[in-house]
Structures are given as C-alpha cells and as structure tokens.
Amino acid sequence: MMAWSAAAEMLCERATEVADLLKLVANEQRLLLLCRLREGEASVGELVGLCDLSQSSVSQHLSKMREGGLVQTRREATTIYYSMANPHVDALMEFLCSRFGRTEEHI
C-alpha cells in the first residue's frame, strides 16, 4: 500500500475542520461576499448591492462567516466593517476569482 504524503495525512487529521470551512464557502451569496471582501473591507450597506438579498440576509451570511472565522469586523461609530480574516480562505478566493473570473455585472 502506498504511503500518504505528510500533507495528505495532515488533511485527514483536519478533515472535519476543512469540510466545515468549505460548507461555509459553498454558498453562492457567501462566495460573492467573500470575493468582494478580498478587495477590501466593506459595511453591510455596501455589500447589500452585490446580491439580491435584504440587509438582514446579508447580515446573517456575514454572521455565519464571522462565527466560522472567515471574516472579521471593525466598528467605526455605528458602522461595522467586514474584512477577510482567514488567509487560507483569502487564498482560496484568489484561486476561485482568478480561475472563474468575474465581471462587474456579476458582482
């Protein structure tokens, strides 16, 4: 039987963690939000225009991603700004955005 590489063994040890992260990313709206957040921080109000969702729905998606460690927040007065928090997710989004491309009309 062929031995697994060290990287494959590490992935097996962290498979649940990786699967949970991918579940968070595997949503069309969250993909759009993450792609936008790669360009810099944004408020919920700025992100609402990206997808066909209410402010409440965008906030719920951001909350899930924050709980999962994908995004972080910064408060300025009454406005909360979101930004990327996980360098692995940032790298994944870089790959997805470059591989599948995007145009302003889609985002």
Image: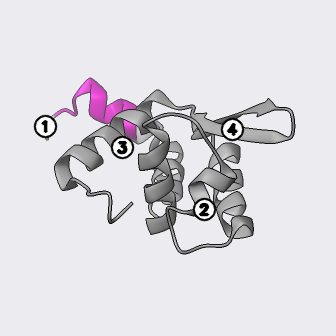
Q: Residues within 10 Å of mark 1 (few under 14, many from 20)?
A: few
Nearest to N terminus: mark 1 or mark 3? 1
Q: Which mark is residue 67?
A: none
Q: Which residue is mark 1?
A: 2
- Disc 1 to disc 3, C-alpha distance: 32 Å
Question: Which residue is nearer to you in this view: 35 or 23?
Answer: 35
Could you give the CA–CA distance between mark 1 and mark 2, rounded to whole angstroms? 50 Å
Asked if the residue under mark 4 is in contact with the one under mark 2, i.e. CB atoms within 8 Å, the reply is: no
Residue 97's spot in the image, x, y percent? 28, 48
Q: Earlier in the sequence, mark 1 or mark 2?
A: 1
The numbered mark, 3 or 4, whose residue comes first in the sequence reads 4
Mark 3 residue type: Met
Give the amino acid type for the residue marked by disc 1 in the picture.
Met
Calculate the distance from the C-alpha at mark 2 to the C-alpha at mark 4: 13 Å
* 93 to the left or right of 73: left
Tag nearer the camera, 1 or 2 = 2
Q: Secondary structure at mark 1?
A: loop
Q: Look at label 2 and name its amino acid.
A: Val
* Quadrant location, the C terminus: bottom left
State the mark number for residue 48: 2
The residue under the point 71% across, 58% down is 59
Label 3 to label 2, Cα distance in Å? Answer: 19 Å
Q: Residue at x 29, y 35 (%)?
A: 8
- Disc 4/disc 1 C-alpha distance (Å): 48 Å
Q: Secondary structure at mark 2?
A: helix
The residue sitting at 57% across, 31% down in the picture is: 85
1 or 3: mark nearer the eye: 3
In primary-sequence order, the first of circles 2 and 4 is 2
Find the distance from the CA under tag 3 to the CA under tag 4. 19 Å
Vertical side of 65 occupied by 11: above or below: above
Query: In this picture, which residue range is highlighted in magenta?
Result: 3-11
